[in-house]
Image (spheres, grey):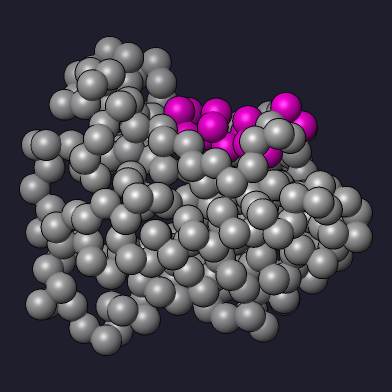
Amino acid sequence: MLAGAGYRIAFTYRPGGTPPDETRNAIAEHDPEVLAVPNELRDFPAALQLAHDVEAARGPIEVVVHGVGPIVVRPFAKCTPEDYRAMVDGNLTSAVALAAAVLPGMRTRGFGRLVFFGMNGSHVTQPARNMALYGAAKAAVVAFARTLALEEARHGITANVVEPGDIRDKTRDRAAALRESAPNPRGRPGSWEDIADAVRFLASDASDFINGAVLAVTGGLSEPYERTAKPS
């Protein structure tokens, strides 16, 4: 969707994980020079390398959409130190490191858009069973983003957060979602287009006066997940 709106796209993928080919081919229909970068954003040096690679190939980074981060869904009593590191490093450290890598250039140019992802309710630290570590990491991401909004606004940089609802099918578009039902106030499931439209707006010039906001794209869902969900 961003490529179709005219943005120059670079995206990351995990080495050894899902190959980037399908995503790259879809984006290339709108942006033939799309760049796929193998980078897990594990630490600050990785984020600096990512920024260098992207800017060398595609020019200045003006918009960052931070969609990085795994999820662990299990009771805290069954979580391990490795789960903790995965949640904190995968979700929070990657966000902090990436912001540190791109903000100097954004400040120099006097423009930037940072879009992060929370989980539904993370802006109020709403608890969710089986998500102690993930919820804590996402709440920290929201706090970090909203603080950046205060500190970087004078440089023409905004920082906002999208909190998606319980969107299980990541390939369902809005047309398909409108034909189905789901146990949320809107009554239909969410789609990737609902999320992408929110991101595109927050990345645009039209959102210049929206800063430090947390946008819930949930269909009005007030719980972390829809009531028929059975997390384990």
The residue furthest top is 179
**Residue at the spot 53% in from the left edge and 78% down from the top edge:** 42
Residue situated furthest right in the rendering = 108
Q: Position of residue 28 (x, y in %)?
A: 68, 40
**How many numbered marks are there?**
0
- Read off the magenta span: 192-206
Asked if residue 189 lies left or right of residue 212, the reply is: left
Whether residue 19 is visible here, answered yes or no, is no
Q: Is residue 109 above or below residue 95?
A: above
**Which of the two residues, 125 or 82, is positioned nearer the viewer here?**
125
Q: Residue furthest bottom?
A: 81
Quarter assignment of residue 108:
bottom right
Q: Quadrant of residue 169?
A: top left
Q: Mark yes or no: residue 110 visible.
A: yes
- Is residue 215 inside the magenta stretch? no
Say which of 106 and 90 sits in front: 106
Residue 87 drawn at (x, y percent): 36, 71
* Residue at horizontal 26 percent and vertical 51 percent from the top: 126
Is 200 located above or below residue 96 in the figure?
Answer: above
Image quarter in which the C terminus is found: bottom left
Where is residue 165? Give x, y as percent.
Answer: 33, 38
x and y percentages locating residue 54 in the rendered image: 77, 62
Q: Residue at x 83, y 53 (%)?
A: 155
Q: Is residue 144 left or right of residue 127?
A: right
Q: Quadrant of the N terminus?
A: top right
Residue 208 vs residue 147: left or right?
A: right
Q: Residue at x 49, y 42 (%)?
A: 214
Residue 193 magenta: yes
Secondary structure mostly taken by the magenta-highlighted segment of the chain: helix
